[in-house]
Amino acid sequence: MRIVMKFGGTSVRGDGFRRIHEIVSRHLPENQVVVVVSAIKGVTDELIDAAHRARRGDEREISEFLDRLVDSYMELVEVSLGREHLNEAFGIASKLKRDLERVLFGIMYLGELTPRSLDYVAGYGETFSAKVGAFILSKLGLEAVGLTGKEAGIVTDDTFGDARILLNATRYSARRAIEPLLEAGKVPVVGGFTGATQEGVMTTLGRGGSDYTATALGAALDADQVWLWSDVDGIMTADPRIVPNARTVPELSYREAAELAVVGAKALHPRALEPVWDAGIPVYVRNTFNPNGPYTVIHGKEEVNEKVVKAVSLIREAGIITVYGPSMVGAPGTAAKVLEVVGSTGTNIMMIAQSASESNISIAVRRTSLDKVYSALERELVSRGVLRSVEVEDDVSIVAVVGAGMKGTPGVSAKIFSAVAERGINVIMVAQGGSEMNISFAVKAEDADEAVRAVHDAFRLGEA
Ligand code: ADP
Ligand code: ASP
Ligand code: MG
């Protein structure tokens, strides 16, 4: 079998590469394994932060940051291998550090941070994980070869920060890069989350993008399975950090899992299932810290309907933009114009709702996109008299309730909203996905956890 295994940010930290070594070795040599790694948890945030600081011009902070970054990777080496190989590993990390340093200083001297340079910096954690990780795995006895997303042949469009993988191009270049390694019995260790445009400019795939790297490589290399190793027992009925009695969902169809992911739930990258869906490659979601524990398999079998609702997920850091305009009443095409303007900013719309009176439309987007959507609407539509006004509500969270069995089962929304109302929570906005597999609603951020628990309890998802 050919298996692509992705190890997330918590799975690579500490003695993570020892565990990775153990897991991967268990499947060799009968299988071919491609490893995809994330940055150490927290490092991507720090890199993004460092890029912004660089723009503000703090030279000392850049140097301190880079030293800390190298230290955190040296710690991985020391925990996994002891002190013996530290010098050699330091050489690898220092070279990466110098490349990154050049870009950060460039940002500093120019005083300008473009989406392109931000992506270069943001993806560097994965490069460190791939190169240093491959070093550790080699010393532990695997023939590991570290590759960046670009070196592995991940080709994307140029939507910096949220690039889409071009599957045909990737199929061609990933095969060229990786097949020979697999045939020689080697283990490619690919940095997730990043790729490059056809011109070779580095891009990132959106937060949590290593999942997407893994499934795209799975499809490109005709893998038999993709395994996503994380720090919880698969995809659960809700985030276990919010709902302590959350349980593993044993099976999800591609469609159900996509509904969960598309709204932006943390468990899976929104586009992660696209590459494997048509090919029917099953995706297993498993726990590195409990490798023999329960897990989830996502596959193409039609959904089994024994549970109407399968999972409740939460997307924090969202915002709602509401546009008002008397001219919208009976003015066909206004909604289309609004969506076009939002679309032109490259923003992903998480939910949309139009009031029955047609006098307003609300759109939920990530909080980070609020400013650009607001200014685009003001500039293109309010100032031209198409809309009366635009209002912004930040600080909301979106709860998404997902399950194929919701389709055609009456009373599901009534049950959701009465459960939420009983806890005194006000629902700001509601949208039902066209697929009827997903009902999403927005609440104030401070009410979000309780709303998730209310729905989880109402459908008794914590019970077998
Ligand atoms: P990784 O780096 O391994 O991809 P992430 O932090 O991106 O890990 O995602 C895993 C985390 O997602 C879990 O620790 C868990 O808290 C959170 N999570 C949110 N919703 C769910 C869910 N429904 N099932 C499983 N985990 C979830
Ligand atoms: N390191 C990236 C992030 O934090 C990608 C990933 O973890 O999948 O978003
Ligand atoms: Mg993730």
Image: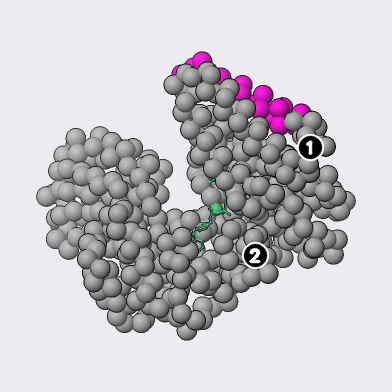
Identify the image quadrant of residue 148: top right
Image-based side of 147 in relation to 114, left or right? right
Mark 1–mark 2 Cα distance, whole angstroms, equals: 28 Å
Task: Provide the secondary structure element on which disc 2 rests.
Answer: loop
**Circle on res. 47:** none
Magenta span contains residue 68: no
Q: Nearer the viewer, residue 39 or 15?
A: 15
Classify mark 1: residues with Cα within 10 Å, few (<14), some (14-19) or many (20+).
few
Residue furthest bottom in the image: 306
Task: Provide the secondary structure element on which disc 1 rests.
Answer: loop
First reached walking from the N terminus: tag 1 or tag 2? 1
Residue furthest top in the image: 109
Q: Nearer the viewer, residue 87 or 35?
A: 87
Residue at 47% across / 26% down in the picture? 53
Residue at 14% across / 43% down in the picture? 388
What amino acid is at disc 2?
Asn
User: Measured from the top left, where is residue 268 in percent x and y?
Assistant: 52, 58
Say if 204 sits above or below 235 in the image: above
Identify the image quadrant of residue 23: bottom right
Q: Magenta residues: mostly which secondary structure?
A: helix
Write down the region rendered in magenta: 91-114
Callout 1 touching callout 2 (CB < 8 Å): no
Image-based side of 130 in relation to 51, left or right? right
User: Measured from the top left, where is residue 295 in percent x and y?
Assistant: 61, 69
* Viewport quadrant of the N terminus: bottom right
Classify mark 2: residues with Cα within 10 Å, few (<14), some (14-19) or many (20+).
few
Q: Which residue is mark 1?
A: 83
Q: Nearer the viewer, residue 34 or 422?
A: 422
Q: Which residue is mark 2?
A: 290
Say if 250 sits above or below 206 in the image: below
